[in-house]
Image (tube, rainbow, N blue to C red):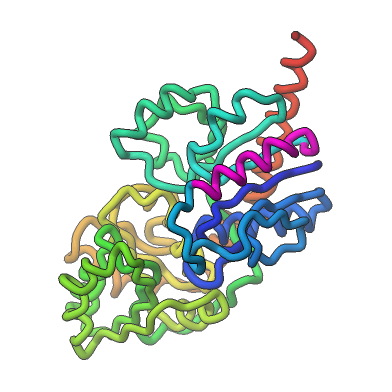
Amino acid sequence: MRIAQIAPLYEAVPPKSYGGTERVVSWLTEELVRQGHDVTLFASGDSKTTARLEPIWPTSLRLSKVLDPVSLHMLMLERVRQRAAEFDILHFHLDYLPFSLFLRQSTPFVTTLHGRLDLPEQQPVFTAFAAAPVISISDSQRRPIPQAGWVRTIHHGLPANSLTPRYDKGEYLAFLGRIAPEKRVDRAIAIAKRCGMKLKIAAKIDKTDRAYFEAEIKHLFDQPHVDFIGEIDDSRKSDFLGRASALLCPIDWVEPFGLVMIEAMACGTPVIVYDHGSAREVVDNGVTGFVVKDEAEAVAAVHRAIQLPRPAIRKRFEERFTVKRMTDEYLEVYRALIEHEAQQLKRA
């Protein structure tokens, strides 16, 4: 199958550190190539792939002094349109940006929606483009916009051998991700303190969150049980997550998926997550961790999570969240859309 994967330009594929969407695009692209498909990846020029790379800008926008990132994404969409006939399917990871242009051409396409969908201004967009086929990364993500052109929910999956599990009890609690209001690292700090445990924080601080960090979070890092180690890359995740007693995800928003949760499971590490968004779809309560409602439940869950058998957590990860399972489900969607377009052409 001739497949185009179209990634955001903000991070390289795969990202050098933080970047969930681009990481998933990389895993999917590499597995498609491994299965023998002809894949072209439209992405930043510093991306690394075994597919055919079509670079749009020399480096990821995070590393570039680009003041208008939308212009480069518009350029990428036009490049894809010019080459659309070369592919059997176009797979976008750019939210709603492709809808208007690609509903007006004949090559089948689909868009995976990776972000939040609960903003009021998004409602008229998905109403206007209800014919655009879209994939959700959790059933929870769909709820704000039932009118969208949903074709399937496909949970993320990562390569089974990308993270190495550890099966001891762990040495600390872990927080991995971004320092942002919706991620609530302040809750994680409070939970760890009540548990009498060290909290290691491996997190990115975006420019947009710098003021929040300085005003509300920075002073919390002075506490003796807090160890802020900064942003880490994939090569350090096995050790960071595998040596943790549990991963804390005290989120305060409708998390569309939560990639960090399955990364922890791949390491055999239990997850404690607040009951928002995709939490109950990703975490098997009492098996791979616990879904909690408040700080008191989280503290109690830490002590229970330490007793969970870590090989069982890894086994559930292998059953539910591998890249092969994810890729096979995407291929089913691709084939269905290609067949649908062929039937439409026959009727025309």
Percent x, y of residue 235? 57, 79
Quick check: 30 left or right of 38? Answer: left
Q: Is residue 188 above or below residue 123?
A: below
Percent x, y of residue 186? 21, 70
Q: Residue at x 61, y 62 (%)?
A: 13
Q: Residue at x 43, y 28 (%)?
A: 126
Q: Which sits in the foreground, 107 or 155? A: 107
Quick check: 253 left or right of 329? Answer: left
**Residue bounds of the magenta highlight:** 71-87
View extreme (top): residue: 347
Q: Looking at the rendering, in which quadrant would you find the N terminus? A: top right
Q: Is residue 33 above or below residue 128?
A: below
Residue 300 visible to an observer of this rendering? no
Please identify the dominant SS of the magenta region: helix
Q: Residue at x 72, y 22 (%)?
A: 341
| Magenta stretch holds residue 124 | no
View extreme (bottom): residue: 224
